[in-house]
Every structure is written in structure tokens, then in C-alpha cells.
């Protein structure tokens, strides 16, 4: 049984991951920021422990780790997005995107590191996006953060590999989560048609990829695209 921490675990991909790892028999903790009712529902369903915490707040994250102790698997899933022209994006929103999507990983990895180093083993899974690979119009800031996540993953895999710590990344495509709620039905249908497997993704598709990477002892520094072939 492993101790697993999943950030952004109250809804969408994070909640699917909590369900999957709990069903495997792991000891699961998850962090969430604002969705108390959703977090409580996930906890009741799975037996996982939810902790309210903003990953961009280093002090709050350190306090959360004091409650958990050491973890074996760290899944950095927390993320926010913004759609709109970069010229109209307030600087505060740009900073907030980087604080959550990139600095949040920095905080989580550093908090988990003492336990990883003590055991000389560990698994870190980050979550980027296909837009971190190709970029997306009107999502410049989001794409920039997700590109940074990929670069950070590859660098950490090299840095931490000698200490027995694997670091991999998942780059989801179009996944049916709250991030799609403001996208028109026509656009969602076009995205589905443009996906070779003929459907948009489900949170469970990404959770299954997380479980694979958690168990793949000879895989590190990789970006696993979970996009149904939308980007090849």
C-alpha cells in the first residue's frame, strides 16, 4: 500500500484519480482549494482524506504535509486556466496562473522531498496539457504554464533519478471537466470529430494513465499524451 497525495482532488481529473487510487487500496490524501461540498462527497465515497489548501501558498502546503507525513506518490494535478487575448489579460491573472500551475508544483515537490530522499524512492506525476506541447490561441498564459510544467518534469527527472525518484508528466487533450463548461456545444462536437478515436476524453482516462505511471518503475522524464490522437 502506498501513500498517495493528489492535488486538485475534489473534482474532475483529480476526483477520478482519488477514486482509482483508493480502489487500489492505497492510502489517499487530496488537496482542494474552494470546493468544500465536492471534497466532502469525494471523501465520503472513497475514504480518502481531503485537506483544504491553496498549492500556491507555501506555508499552507507545509502545514498540510505535517498532517500527512511522508508520501510515496505525488500527483500534481491542481491547475487553473484562462481563455482570452493575452493583450487583455491582467498581470495579476497571469501571475496567478503561474503561481498555481507552476509554483504549486515547486512547493509540492519541495514539501515531499524529505520523505523521498529518506526512502531513496518516490514517484512524481505532473499534469500539463496538449496546449503545453503545441500552444493554443487565446490561451497563451495557460499554454505557457503547461509548457513550463513539461520542462520542469524533464529537468527534475534527470536531477532526481539518482535518488530513486521518478518524475513523469501527463498531457491531457480535451477532457470533459469544468474547464470545458464555457465551450460551446458546437465547438465540443468539432473537437470530438477531430479526435481519431471519435470521442472527447473522460477524467477516468487520465486517472488510468496516472496509475500506469505510478507503477512503471523504468519510466521517467516522459510526457504521456492522453488526447485520443488529437495531437500526434
Image (spheres, rainbow, N blue to C red):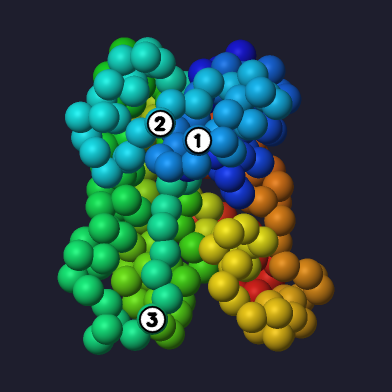
Seen in the image, is 62 located left or right of residue 190?
left
Locate the N terminus and report the quarter of the image it occupies: top right
Q: Residue 171, image x and y in percent? A: 52, 59
Q: Residue 174, image x and y in percent? A: 62, 67
Give residue 7's quadrant in the image.
top left
Q: Which mark is residue 84?
A: 3
Callout 3–callout 2 Cβ contact below 8 Å: no
**Residue at which label 2 appears:** 52
Q: Earlier in the sequence, mark 1 or mark 2?
A: 1
Q: SS of the residue at dot 1?
A: helix
Seen in the image, is 97 located left or right of residue 12?
left
- For the question of whether residue 186 can be seen, the reply is yes
Tell me if mark 1 has few (under 14), some (14-19) or many (20+) residues whose alpha carbon lies within 10 angstroms of its own.
Answer: some
Viewer-side label of 1, 2:
1
Residue at mark 1 to residue at mark 2: CA–CA distance:
8 Å
- For the question of whether residue 120 can be seen, the reply is no
User: Closest to the observer: 55 or 21?
Assistant: 55
Amino acid at each position: 500500500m502506498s501513500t498517495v497525495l493528489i492535488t486538485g482532488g475534489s473534482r474532475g481529473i483529480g476526483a477520478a484519480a482519488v477514486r482509482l487510487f483508493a480502489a487500489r487500496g492505497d492510502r489517499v490524501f487530496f488537496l482542494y482549494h474552494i470546493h468544500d461540498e465536492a471534497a466532502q462527497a469525494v471523501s465520503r465515497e472513497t475514504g480518502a482524506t481531503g485537506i483544504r489548501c491553496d498549492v500556491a501558498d507555501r506555508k499552507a502546503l507545509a502545514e498540510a504535509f505535517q498532517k500527512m507525513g511522508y508520501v510515496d506518490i505525488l500527483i500534481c494535478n491542481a491547475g487553473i486556466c484562462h481563455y482570452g487575448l493575452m493583450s487583455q489579460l491582467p498581470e495579476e491573472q497571469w501571475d496567478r496562473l503561474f503561481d498555481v500551475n507552476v509554483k504549486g508544483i515547486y512547493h509540492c515537490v519541495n514539501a515531499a522531498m524529505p520523505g523521498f530522499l529518506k526512502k531513496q524512492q518516490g514517484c512524481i506525476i505532473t499534469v500539463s496539457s496538449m496546449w503545453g506541447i503545441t500552444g493554443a490561441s487565446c490561451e497563451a498564459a495557460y499554454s505557457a504554464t503547461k509548457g513550463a510544467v513539461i520542462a520542469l518534469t524533464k529537468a527534475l527527472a534527470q536531477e532526481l533519478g539518482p535518488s530513486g525518484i521518478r518524475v513523469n508528466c501527463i498531457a491531457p487533450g480535451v477532457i470533459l471537466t469544468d474547464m470545458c463548461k464555457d465551450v460551446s456545444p458546437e465547438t465540443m462536437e468539432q473537437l470530438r470529430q477531430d479526435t481519431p478515436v471519435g470521442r472527447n476524453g473522460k477524467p477516468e482516462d487520465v486517472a488510468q494513465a496516472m496509475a500506469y505511471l505510478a507503477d512503471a518503475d523504468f519510466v521517467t522524464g516522459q510526457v504521456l499524451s492522453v488526447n485520443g490522437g488529437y495531437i500526434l
